Amino acid sequence: MKVVTRFAPSPTGYIHIGNVRSAIYPYLLAKQNAGKMILRIEDTDRERYIEGATELIEDTLEWLGLNWDEGPIVGGPHAPYFQSERKDIYHEYARKLIASGRAYADPTPPEQIEKYRQECNEKKVPFLYRKFRPDETPEWEPGIPLRFKAEPKDHEWHDEVMGDMHAGPEVQDDIILIKKDGFPTYNFAHIVDDAEMGVTHVMRGVEYLSSTPNYLALYDALGLERPKLVSLPHILAPQGNKKLGKRDGAKSVTEYRDDGVLAEAMLNYLACLGWNDGTEQEIYTKDELIKDFSLDRIQNSGARYDETKLLWYSGQWIRKIFDEQGVDALYERTMGFWPEVADNYNDNYKCKVLSIIYDRLKTLSDLREMTTYFFAEPEIDLDMLLQNKFLRKLSEAELESLLKTTITELANLKDWDANSLQDTLNHLLESTGKKPAVLFSLIRLAVSFASFSPALNLTLEVLGREKSLARLNAVATAI
């Protein structure tokens, strides 16, 4: 069987963390089996449609490297891929159900339906519309809602994640197939589209599990073969007590990208959020995920979202790219993430800065805060110097003396490179009798006034002789 999966988002806003994972798993399964993944835009809810949301979905998938085989932009044999453009197809299937007696036009006013619902609430019984099904119905035409005529029965099915499932007739109802505006509901449209497009595996959130009996009834009524059903457990809020939502601090995928989280890290983290291959491995390339992915390793319970873990992945991937592809490859990713003052410096200098700072980065946007002193003169902050836990026991005279001794030694240095600088720093430790935490903290703060910096010899090497000595002199004078 050729595996065909689909990702079918609604263009109703930004693309959420949970939405993206629902694209990753279908992609991995399709690629693993030399199949294809279809991108289909479910835009029939016109009231919630947001202009530009489709482009945002496409851009996000492309950024993550989840290239679809059929769908918008790339086309394919099952076009169109926007549900709003497939209305005639849904109406054709609707007429088949009408002809077989399994669908009916329902002119019942919404106010009357609400009364039925309230009546059930008062009696404390479940509301099932089929119990209020009208005796006489008009001939259906667009403009009148069309309902499925349920024939409730027991349903059994196998879910690739949840296992063998069963539901009785009490959960099946006369669901709406075509709305008053002529557009189909999700309940109807996705079944028609999946059948028309040859989808073999339907992956979606576990929240659709309760609706599955109604979907199975529709498959049977239309004489369609059931695809394999794969229910994906929720991504949970950090507290683990509910489904992750906008109010739980999780940003859109686009916001994470703008904050400098690498695409590889986002893909890696979300793929492993609710799945593992049974090993201790955590870092996976896309090719490794394709190779190792399997449905039976998707956990059947929710997975907590942990932004700290995502940022850890991002830091790991920054180092991985640098170590395996070199500074130039990582530097290409950094455009737009440097402090504004870095615009006055050339690529070569910024690459040098990146090469000594990269292993401290969690996201590329950290460059703005961590590298400013390489491009602009830091403001001298004597309080920061005098209150440092390693320096506060020294008098101002002692600090000034240490700085002047350091300046003299460094000024006489013939070769201004990392090794020579480290030798000189080591000699200063011997000649001054100070511990590294004291002497090196003093020099580091004097040249950067930053909360942290890379190895001191590397920092001095990149700053250069002239700039380093000028900063040390300025602080010595200011004390």
Image (cartoon, rainbow, N blue to C red):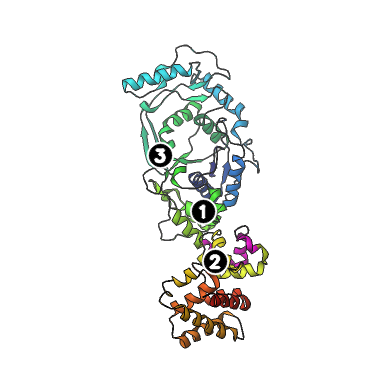
Magenta residues: mostly which secondary structure?
Answer: helix
Q: Secondary structure at mark 1?
A: helix
Could you say where residue 36 lies in the image, as x and y percent from the top left?
57, 45
**Residue at the image point whose x is 47% and y is 69% from the top:** 383
**Mark 3, mark 1: which one is toward the viewer?**
1
Mark 1, Cα crowd under 10 Å, few <14 / some 14-19 / many 20+, is: many
Q: Quadrant of residue 2?
A: top right
Residues under labels 2 and 1: Cα distance?
18 Å
Q: Amino acid at mark 1?
A: Met
In-image side of 218 versus 34 (left or right): left
In the image, what residue type sits under mark 2?
Tyr
Q: Is residue 34 left or right of residue 434?
A: right
Mark in the foreground, 2 or 1: 2
Q: Secondary structure at mark 2?
A: helix
Does 371 appear above or below 194? Answer: below
Q: Residue 92: x and y, percent?
A: 58, 25
Quadrant hosting residue 377: bottom right
Q: Which residue is mark 1?
A: 266
Q: Badge 2 local density, few (<14 within 10 Å), some, or many (20+)?
A: many
Q: Position of residue 248 (x, y in %)?
A: 43, 45
The residue singled out by tag 2 in the image is 358
The residue where tag 3 is placed is 158
